[in-house]
Amino acid sequence: MEHAALSAPVEMESEEILSRIILVVSVASMIGSGWIIISFLFVPSLRTFRHQLILGAVLHPDNAIWLPLMSSGLGISEFLASGNVVISASVNTVGIEIWDPSLKAFCSFNGLMVQTFVVQVLLADYWILSIAICTYLILMDYAHAASWVQNHRAAIWCMAWGLSILWAVLGLVVVGYGYAGGWCWFTSDRVRLFVNFIPRWTIILVIMGIYTRLCLLLYRSHKAISSDHELTLQTPHPHQWQLLDISDGPSQSTHSSIPLRKMMVYPTVYALVWIIPTSVRVYQGMTGKRAPLALEILEKVIETSHGFP
């Protein structure tokens, strides 16, 4: 068994192991992202604007209880992504070879969905970048810009899905999708690297820059308050923290120090997580050799586990 994609195992036994592991992880990820959606619908405290970005809600928080699932965002896109991978991994697990020429249409559709949901920088990463930008606007009291964003949520939603679907369709028409191990996607590692991973790391660096600048500004403001010096930077008002719902208490100290630590955790972990998949793409793309099976499995587990809360 030989595949064009270096990420696809050459032995059936390895293929079965890969598919089973991906299936288990995808089901768990689907449950995790589903829990995020359910929590948003039924827990009022999780309907802040920042949580709406995580879910992708376009409705006013007072009306979010009847939010339809078509109002998609990070949580819902990860749910659909996991569902798509569950289908392809299940087909492989039961012995149906989705790389067979007779299943070309199925493989192309599966690849289209993978490009749209699982690893597409214009969808999942778009929502993460949106959360970072909106966090910055709200906390730094850019009232006009923050108000515009909160009043035009439909535009944010349409831009995310429109660009992502367009990018995936262009991939189907221009390059095409083939079997890539566990699911269908671009068979060329270099194409994957330039189409997804380079833009992804660009966004990661932008996010890190946003949160670093925000943390520095808030730290200086907090330090000025603590030492009773004259404020040179305006501290975000309590209502701003309430919009984000990331503070842990009513004190002024809490409004600065605890959220600072929280804000840097996610972008740092997110960057660390994508080191392995990117390294595999660079290695295979530059050398033309397959990475070890264990590393390939780890890479795909990372790519399919975004739904974990």
Image: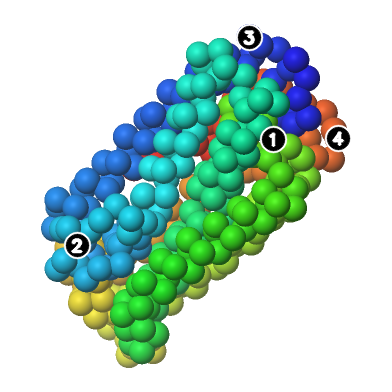
Crowding around mark 1 (Cα neighbors within 10 Å: few <14, some 14 to 19, many 20+) is many
Q: Is the C-beta separation of discs 1 and 4 under 8 Å?
A: no
Element under disc 1: strand
Crowding around mark 3 (Cα neighbors within 10 Å: few <14, some 14 to 19, many 20+) is few
Q: Between 30 and 309, which is closer to the camera in this rendering?
A: 30
Q: Position of residue 73 (x, y in %)?
A: 39, 57
Furthest-front residue in view?
102
Q: Position of residue 188 (x, y in %)?
A: 77, 40
Spatial CA distance of label 2 from label 3 is: 47 Å
Which residue does the image show at 78% across and 30% down from the upper left?
Answer: 4
What amino acid is labelled 4 in the image? Answer: Thr
Spatial CA distance of label 1 from label 4 is: 21 Å
Q: Is the C-beta separation of discs 3 and 4 under 8 Å?
A: no
What amino acid is labelled 1 in the image? Answer: Gly
Crowding around mark 4 (Cα neighbors within 10 Å: few <14, some 14 to 19, many 20+) is few
Work out which quarter of the rendered image holds the N terminus and state it: top right
Element under disc 3: helix
Which residue does the image show at 78% across and 35% down from the upper left?
Answer: 284
Spatial CA distance of label 1 from label 3 is: 20 Å
What amino acid is labelled 3 in the image? Answer: Glu
Report the residue marked by disc 2.
Answer: 64
Report the residue marked by disc 3.
Answer: 13
